[in-house]
Structures are given as C-alpha cells and as structure tokens.
Amino acid sequence: MDSIVIHSLKKTYGKGQPPAVDIRGDLCISKGELFGIIGPDGAGKTTLFRMLATLVSPDSGTAVLEGYDVMADYRKIRTILGYMPGRFSLYSDLSVRENLEFFASVFGKDLESNYGLIENIYCRLKPFERRKAGKLSGGMKQKLALCCSLIHSPSILFLDEPTTGVDPSSRRELWENLAQLKASGMTIVVSTAYMDEACRCDRVGMMKSGRFLTVDSPERIISGFDRRLVSVKSDEMFRLLHDLRGIGDVDRCYTFGETHHLTLKPGSRMTVREIGSVLAGKYGHKGVSVAETDATLEDCYMNLEEKL
Amino acid sequence: MKEFFAFVKKEFLHIFRDTRTLLVLIGLPTVLIVLFGFAISTEIRNVNVGLFSADADDSVERLMRKIDQSEYFTYVGRFNTEEDVDEAMRRGVIDAAVMFGSGFSSALYSPEGAEVFIAADATNPNNASMEIMYLSGIIAEYFKDDISAIHAAGPQDGSVTASGMLQPNLHMLYNPQLKSSYNFVPGIMGLILMLICSLMTSVSIVREKESGSMEVLLVSPIRPINIVLAKMIPYFVIACVVLVNILLLTIFVLKVPIAGSFFWMILVSVIYIILSLGIGMLVSSLVRTQIIATLICGMIFLVPVMMFSGMLYPIESMPVALQWFAQIIPAKWFIEAIRKIMIEGVPVRYVTVEILIMTAMAVAVFTAAVIKFKDKLD
C-alpha cells in the first residue's frame, strides 16, 4: 500500500531562477518504508519536504499522503504528519519537558498516552528534563526535536537532515531509533548529505538540481554501477589527483576519504598494475598503491551526476 | 480549547523567562510618567524675580512677599536703578522684574489708575509669557484686595472703583494650575500602550518565523488564527497591568484627578489596547524579520503617534494635509477621548465618535490581518 504518492512536483522561487524542485514522473513510497533522500546542499531536499509537509504550495503537480492531497486536504495531513525541520526549531527558552508537553498539547494529545513511542529516545533526555532546550548539545537537541515530532504518533514522519552537525555516536543512535519506528509501521522519509547513512534506508532517491537521478534500493544502485572503480594512494596526494587526470584512460577522478577514486573510461583495458607503473615511472610518485575496489553509494552518486 | 490554553501558557513562559524585557515593559511607563511629571515640565517654577521701585513703598514690599510666597516665583531682592535690573537680567540673577514708577501709590487711587512694568527674559518665549501672565495675575489680585480694603474702610467716589476694578478675568478651564501632566498623561498612555501591544506582539510572532518554530507550528493541526490570538492574550494582560500602573501613578503621584467616569475610561483604553494588538498582528503577518517589525512599529507608528496625536503639537495648527493624516492615527482618537473623560470629565456621549472610530479601526485591522495571515510559508 502506498503511503506517499508524488506525481511530478515542480516549485520555482522567483522569476528567472532554475526550479528548486522539478520532479518528473511518479514516485510512490509504500507504508512502513524508510525512504532516504540524498543529495548535496541546494539539491532541493528541503523544498521537497516543505511541499510534502503542506508548508509550500507546488507550482504544478500533486502529491498525496495517506490519501490526502497536499493542496486540498492540507489540514487533514497536518494531523497525521510528523515533521522535523533541518534546523533546530524548538523553543530554546523552554525546558525539555515544557517543549515536549507543549507540542503534545498542540496536537491535542497528552504526554502519557503516546509516551511509549518516544520512550527509547526520551530515556536519554530524561536526566536533562529541566534544562532549557537551548542549552542542550547538538545530538540532544535532535533527540528532543525527534521526540516532539513523534509525540502525536504520526503515520508519516519527515526528517530533514536530522544528522547534520551531530556527533557519530548520536547519528548511529538516531538511525537505530528510525529502524525501531519503521518496525512499528511508520512511513519515514529522511534526507541526509551523508551517503554512508543512506545504506540503512529501504530505498534512496538521489537528488541533484531538484530532480531524482535515481530511486532504488542501495544494493541495486550499487550493483548498477557499470564502471571499473580504482582506489589510488601515494605520498603526494594533491599532485596525484592532478596527475591521474592526465592519464588518458581515466574518466573521472575524485577524493574519497584518504584515497582517490577513479573510474576508467568504458572499454578501457588498463590494469591496476599499469596505472601504478605510469604513476611511479612517468610522474615519479612514491609509495603508490593502486587497487580495484567496490563502489559505494557516493561513487554511484558521482557517476550518476555525470550522466545528468 | 486545550491546545489554545497550552499555547497561552507557553507565551507567558516566554515572557516571564525574558525578565529584562518584562522589566522594561513595566518599568518604562513608570519612568516616563515620573520623568514627564517632575523633570520634564513645561510649567514654570522657582522663577527669580527682582524689584525696582522709585519710591520706598510699604505696599510694594508686601506685594513682593506675596509673589515670593507663590510656588512659581522667588523674590531675589530690590534693585536701586533700572540699569541694575538690566544688569541682573543679563547675568541671569533674575528672570523677571516688577518695576514701579515714582508716585505709584498715589496714582493707584487716582481715576487714571497706576502703571506697573513687568519685564521678563523672553529667550524662552513660552516661559516668558507664562511668567508675565502669572505675575500680572498675582499683582492684580493683590491690588484688588488692597483697594477693597480701602473701600471697606470708608466711602470713596465711583471713579476709583471703575479704574481699580477693570481687570481681565481669565479662567483656565479643567486645568486651573496649567499643570502639564494633564496634557501628557493621556499622551503617555497612548504611546506606551501602542508600544507594548503592537511592537511586542508583532516581534513575538515574527520571532517564531525567524527561529523556524513557526514551521513546526504550521505543520500542526492548530489553526494559525489561534496561534496569533494566543500570542495576544499575554500582551493584553501586560498592557492592562501597565494601564493600571499608569493610572495609579497619575492619581496618587502626579495628583491628576480623574474627572469623568472611571469605567468608560478603562473601556476606551481596552478598545485602544485591542486595536494596537491588531496592528501588531497585521505587521507580523506582513514581515519576516524582527528588525523590520521593530522598525515599522518604532518608526512608522511611534513617531506619528508623538507628532500627530496632539500630544506635543496641537493638530489644529498643522497644514490641512497633515491634519487629514492625523485622523488615521489611532492614538489621536484615544488621546482625545481620554482627555475628554479624564480631564474634562464629560459624559460618555461626547466621546461616542472617538469610541466608534477606534472600534471601526480595530475591526478593519483585524480583518486585514486575518486575510493576510498565511498558514503556509510562501
């Protein structure tokens, strides 16, 4: 059963600007799915969320959430939706508990009846209940924001970049929380700029310039990677990047963590050993190590971005 | 309703957590009232008066003692020549002088009457004219008593009575002592209530837009109109506290009596408070940042309130175009109504026009604000 159905959405801010979101074709997100949206800053993730959350009206196209149209039935949608914006949007001068109680009562609920849903997340906040929300750490703020968006047990949850500016262990906890919520049957759409997190999603949509480059499960996106991918290291990483781009068979080359990743042009027969000898011989690099490697989502994104 | 009260509670928490702003809101009116009441005063007080009299005359000395007794004047001393008076005026020893020519006393009882010269330092024309008015008042009263005493002593011929009694009879209605507090108390009320209601509500709504919490609120089922109404209630309460504060200070510290109906004065103030809240709401539905909201309320509302409400300058003496402009300033109607009820003490039917205009303005402003208020971000 589809929880969210998007039918070509378009939104442009200001005349003469390129559209912020320009989704062509249909996208269906089924009930209980954990859907990830990945893409760089300015890809249109926030605008897409705001259109789905009935905050911004699309210029054209429609979206239906749990059978309600985002334009016509936006009041209904607002009762079944949990939305956590990208930046901290709670009240800094209210305490943790006051924030939570306020958002519960805004939805006409009381804290106790829905406490079960947030118990796992809130237990970490409990010791700081009386602290002002503005004085919490980044990870704690996100936990509180998540609690506040869950307190009315929504059937759909939107999280706009929940892990930006959050330490790694809090990020891991957040994704564990999302997995638990998903298990309870909630439809979750989450955006992130971190590609490694997206692997935890059932499906991911890769966004660029307001469009989806691809929508599929992380495994299928990775298995669809159709190039040979090589990881290269040497003592002079900066010069190496420049030199690699000078090699004829190299299609793209980009920094990937501590190494450089390069894709070879289709049909290239150049071996790993040949690349190594060119680097050591022609360019005089020391400590060269070259190896073929498996693609990650990030490599897929780079590859797809090229095709757009 | 539960949602609504949760909202009101939250707004009160915001206000009470921000104690500094709260102190300013409550303290500012007190400071203004006290400042205008005592320090910044258009009344004259402790004016130094000198005397020059060609003859040594007992009744003149008695007059000067009487002048000295009034709270407005201090008798500095007697000068021997007119040049000395001039010199003292230049050096700032005296601000005004009373001068009697020779043969004053005998001329007083002659059919032609006697002449008194009053000189005042007119560098400040307002003060000078007030000094002269007060001085001539005291002098006229003094000699009236003096002459009546003579009348009582024995029969006189009619001509003396005629010249001695010929005096302008001035009446300062409603404010016999010409206290400036009678004028500015309604003005300060108009200013402060507008400030608290329009500025504070608009800033508090726009703050939610700026901090992003409006985004979360809009996605909730609560109706935007309730968000805005919930924001108004705390400021309504604060405005009422301030109103009571101003009135208490006015009555007990400045000793301005409430001449008219207390009930109607409060009612007119409440209408004005609601109107100001509506203006704040309208501003907040039009702008996105706190700084713009502050500028609009501060610059575009407060300055006209000061200039065109009749608080500082009489509207009747303005060019016609500005007089027309003054009609759309809510504070103008409020101040006029309060002046009528509080100072003149007229029955409420004489302020019906003001009450109706303010009510109409409130309805218009609220309608515009509700139409303009969007429950979406764009």
Image (cartoon, coloured by chain):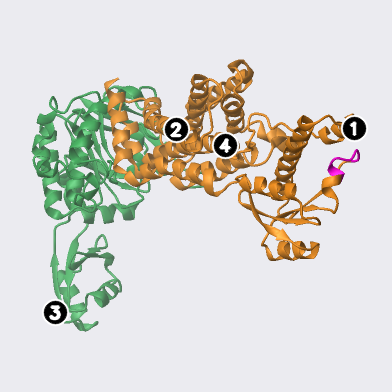
Q: Which residue is mark 1?
A: B159
In the picture, one chain is green; tell me its letter.
A
| Helix, strand or loop status at disc 1 | helix
Q: Chain of mark 1?
A: B
Give the alpha-carbon distance from disc 4 to disc 2, as whole Å.
Answer: 16 Å
Q: Which residue is mark 3?
A: A287
Q: Residue A160, position in %: x, y? A: 27, 43
Q: Amino acid at mark 4?
A: Gly
Residue B47, label in figure: none
Q: Amino acid at mark 2?
A: Leu
In the rendered image, which quarter contains the N terminus of chain B?
top left
Confirm or deny contact between disc 2 and disc 3 (CB under 8 A).
Answer: no
Q: Amino acid at mark 1?
A: Ser
Is label 4 or label 2 in front? 2
Q: Which residue is mark 2?
A: B248
Residue B42 at least partly seen: no
Given residues B271 and B245, the one toward you in this image is B245
| Helix, strand or loop status at disc 2 | helix
Give the alpha-carbon distance from disc 1 to disc 3, as whole Å.
Answer: 130 Å
| Helix, strand or loop status at disc 4 | helix
Q: Which residues are magenta?
A: B107-112
Instruction: Give the side of residue B355 with respect to residue A110, left or right.
Output: right
Confirm or deny contact between disc 1 and disc 3 (CB under 8 A).
Answer: no
Give the alpha-carbon distance from disc 3 to disc 4, as whole Å.
Answer: 83 Å
Q: Which residue is mark 4?
A: B187
Q: Upstream in the sequence, badge 2 or badge 1?
A: 1
| Helix, strand or loop status at disc 3 | loop
Is label 2 or label 3 in front? 2
Confirm or deny contact between disc 1 and disc 4 (CB under 8 A).
Answer: no
